[in-house]
Image: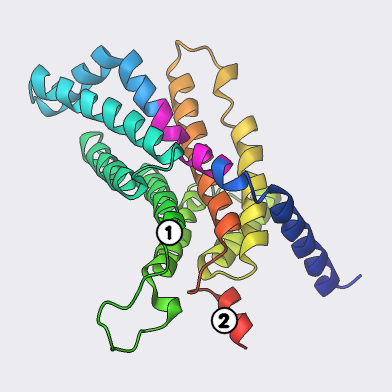
Amino acid sequence: MGHGDLMSQAEDVADQFLRVTKHYLPHVARLCLVSTFLEDGIRMWLQWSEQSEYIDSTWSCGLFIANLFVLINLLGQLGCCVLILSRNFVQHACGALFGIIALQMVAYSILWDLKFLMRNLALGGGLLLLLAECRGEARSVFAGVPSLGHQSSPKHLLQLGGRVLLVLMFMTLLHFDLSLLSFLQNVVGTALMVLVAVGFKTKLAALTLVVWLLCINFTINAFWSVPSYTPMHDFLKYDFFQTTSVIGGLLLVVALGPGGVSMDEKKKEW
């Protein structure tokens, strides 16, 4: 059996998966995507005093500002998750979550930690895909002026931006050591990242990355196997839900397709 036959069979499996799950896949994707915001909002409630004390001690802003920061994060994240899951004011909710991501990046000094920065940017990519899902095809702004074409519509540009940002998550999973297993993981992972970013064999590549991340999440990020009083429990829990949100973004890629700005779309023209 040749390489082309294997690829065709794999694409058939991906298409079959999409046909079977097309009615509930977007709902699962949304739930996965907002899971990290749900978890963080609940954590703000359960660890209110710890969070406010940390912000106060880090920025010397006073307890009033620190408590206001925790309140904004709690209400903003939980409220936006409810709106997104109920499909109400999704664009406004995504905008608010972008603001919360930016606020946390500054408050927790994530800007200076490359790993956490890329993971937060990947989370933003998932929100861009969510915006693309709820946005219809853009119309020409000026009547009588020729459109730039469907490939340049805001929806397709959001899909492109979302795909590119999503793959930043996988750059944090690369291991730069000399073992054969790490080398193979890096090669395969990089190839899949490139395929998703450029939009070639997109659904198959995105599904493969979903399976890969699921395996990582339930083996490496198994926070439930670590005592809750240890710092490692919180780190693993954070990684678990961030990874789950990226899985949600990849599932949206599978459900929506790559969009007009992609090699898959170009192939149809060829």
Tag on residue 266? 2
Q: Position of residue 80 (x, y in %)?
A: 34, 36
Colour mode?
A: rainbow
Give the residue drawn at x 54%, y 23%. Answer: 223
Q: Quadrant of the C terminus?
A: bottom right
> Range of the magenta residues?
28-39
Judge from the rendering whether residue 136 lies leftward or rightward of residue 269; answer left or right.
Answer: left
Question: In the rendered image, is residue 176 in sight?
Answer: no
User: Of all residues shown, which one is farthest toward the right?
Assistant: 1
Residue 246, above or below 147: above
The one of 92 and 8 positioned closer to us in this rendering: 92
Q: Say whether residue 227 is left or right of residue 91.
A: right
What residue sits right under mark 1 in the picture?
132
In this rendered view, identify the residue nearer to me: 197 or 27.
27
Residue 208 location in percent, x, y? Answer: 67, 53
Looking at the rendered structure, the secondary structure element under dot 2 is helix
Q: Judge depth for marks 1 and 2 and give the one in front.
A: 1
Determine the main secondary structure of the stretch shown in magenta. Answer: helix
Camera-side residue: 101 or 187? 101
Horizontally, is 140 left or right of 202 in the view?
Answer: left
Residue drawn 62% across and 44% down?
Answer: 24
Assign the N terminus to one quadrant of the image: bottom right
Label 1 to label 2: alpha-carbon separation: 19 Å
